[in-house]
Image: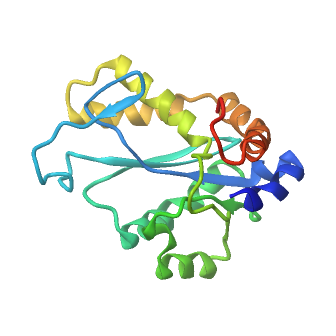
Amino acid sequence: MIGVHQKACGDSPNIWKKVHWSDETKIGHFGHQGKCYVWRKPNTSHHPENTTTTPFFSSSGTGKLFRIEGMMDGAKYREILEGNLFQSTRDLRLGQRLTFQQDNDPKHTAKATLEWFKEKHLKVLEWPSQNPDLNPIDNLWYDLKIAVHQRNPSNLRELEQFCLEEWENIPVARCAKLIETNPKTLATVIATKGGSTKY
């Protein structure tokens, strides 16, 4: 992990403004203080009502947030990218020379997915296979879950609606600040050799 990010920490902070961040999380009907608790019957994790969301974001603000119904495999992941990544990039005005961030989940690193990035001439940020969770989007997940919980959705339709609304309500300044402080976060993790930090 240290070698991957060391050069990035020494580069201009502006490079991080061209990164298009992504991630997935579960947002359940019950939760508190940003923690997610999903109540379901055994062997029903793949059912549509037990959903996962995936978003895009950059220093320019939040991109699209998607509800993923059922299990997400490599094919569905590429379908989401194909249908939404470039529109999100245009909405965020990231220009042509952006870098896309994703973790090393098998569906992200599948041969077909990597070939898709190559065909689209997209640069993918090298991401360590074992690392402290360095994706600044995790801070936005916390914000989103708190905001949705405070609105107390009474059913799954409201849950999805509130997630979409609160994601769009996250201030651009919040996104910009997370990216602005990212080099400092990385430098701290390097200094502690991957150990615990306040981040």
Is 99 rendered above or below residue 28? below
**Visual colour scheme:** rainbow
The residue lying at 47 percent from left, 81 percent from top is 112
> Foreground residue, 179 or 192?
192
**Total tally of numbered discs in the picture:** 0
Q: Quadrant of residue 41?
A: top left
Residue 187, position as x, y percentages in the image: 79, 43
59 with respect to 77 (left or right)? right
In-front residue for pair 96/11: 11
Residue 95 makes an appearance in the image: no
User: Measuring 42% from the left and 27% from the top, which residue is drawn there?
Assistant: 34
State left or right for residue 35 relative to residue 171: left
Residue 96 in view, yes or no: yes
Residue 53 higher or lower than 81, as above or below: above
The picture quadrant where one finds residue 159 is top left
> Percent x, y for residue 161?
34, 34
User: On the rendered image, what quadrant is the C terminus found in?
Assistant: top right
Q: Extreme top residue here? A: 150
Left or right for 167, reference 18: left
Q: Is residue 122 left or right of residue 180?
A: left
Question: Residue 40 appears at what percent x and percent y?
Answer: 15, 41
Whether residue 175 is situated above or below residue 106 in the rendered picture: above
